[in-house]
Image (spheres, rainbow, N blue to C red):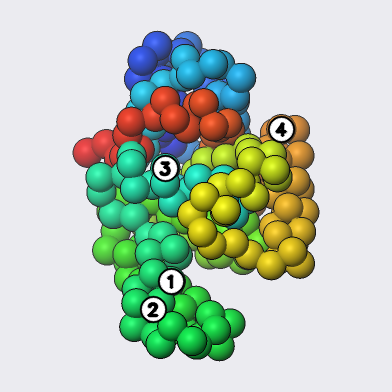
Amino acid sequence: MTVKRTTAYATTSGIALPGQPGAPVVEARTRPAPVVRDLRERSGRGPHALLFGPRDLVVITGLPGSGKSTLMRRTVRGPRVDSQDTRDRWDARMPGFLPYALYRPLVRLSHYAGLRRAVRRGGGVVVHDCGTQAWVRGWLARAARRRGGVLHLLVLDVDPDTALEGQRERGRGVSRYAFLRHRRAAARLLRAVDSGELPRGCGSAVLLDRDAAGTLRRIGFTG
């Protein structure tokens, strides 16, 4: 699927997203209505690539353990900013006996500083989003608009039990309280996207289940 400011298509089938015309159109002076593409429950028959505009920002969001970092490492060949990578770098520096909670603020500060640098470079960037910090999506939407791009959401719809299993598999999880907070935020976002109500400033959203995410081979940018 190629997602641009006025039209979006699946690279494997050429099918336009809902609410869009069946062929490319000249960009209008006003921004088009947000587009939602649901790729769930296709038994792995979804597109193999998602391509966005050269100045766009793409946020991948979902529950902890849903597979966001795995998807990014496997499919994103260009710039990507993953908070998990930042945490891993800090974990490698810190003594093993030091609890993560003590240096978590430094990890977050480092992550947002790196994200700001990546956004200011001007090219397309894929960003890991935990889903509980709505202000981050608002900031990214404004940043994308200022540089002539659009913010897009890729929402991983994974049930809580599967997400918890994903945490166990990677050997790292979040507290019960934090997971419940993530779960409530993810549920709110899914309900909104399902109803076509995207967060302010988002140009499109793509809903993915595990099969659809596993089918993807590339998330990138045109130009």
Q: CA distance from mark 4 to mark 2?
A: 37 Å
Identify the residue shown where x is 52% and y is 41%.
154
- Tag 3: amino acid: Leu
Identify the residue shown where x is 43% and y is 71%.
87
Which residue lies under the disc numbered 1? 87
Which residue lies under the disc numbered 4? 194
Which residue lies under the disc numbered 3? 71
Q: Which mark sits nearer the N-terminus, 3 or 2?
A: 3
> From what the image shows, is residue 3 above or below residue 69?
above
Which residue lies under the disc numbered 2? 90
- Tag 1: amino acid: Arg
x and y, in percent, of residue 215 in the image: 42, 25
x and y, in percent, of residue 147 in the image: 36, 57
The N terminus - image quarter:
top left
Other-residue count near label 3 (Cα within 10 Å), few / some / many at <14 / 14–19 / ≥20:
some
Q: CA distance from mark 2 to mark 1?
A: 5 Å
- 2 and 1 marks in contact (CB < 8 Å): yes
Q: CA distance from mark 1 to mark 4?
A: 32 Å
- Tag 4: amino acid: Asp
Other-residue count near label 2 (Cα within 10 Å), few / some / many at <14 / 14–19 / ≥20:
some
**Mark 1 vs mark 4: in front:** 1
> In the shown orientation, is residue 204 left or right of residue 159?
left
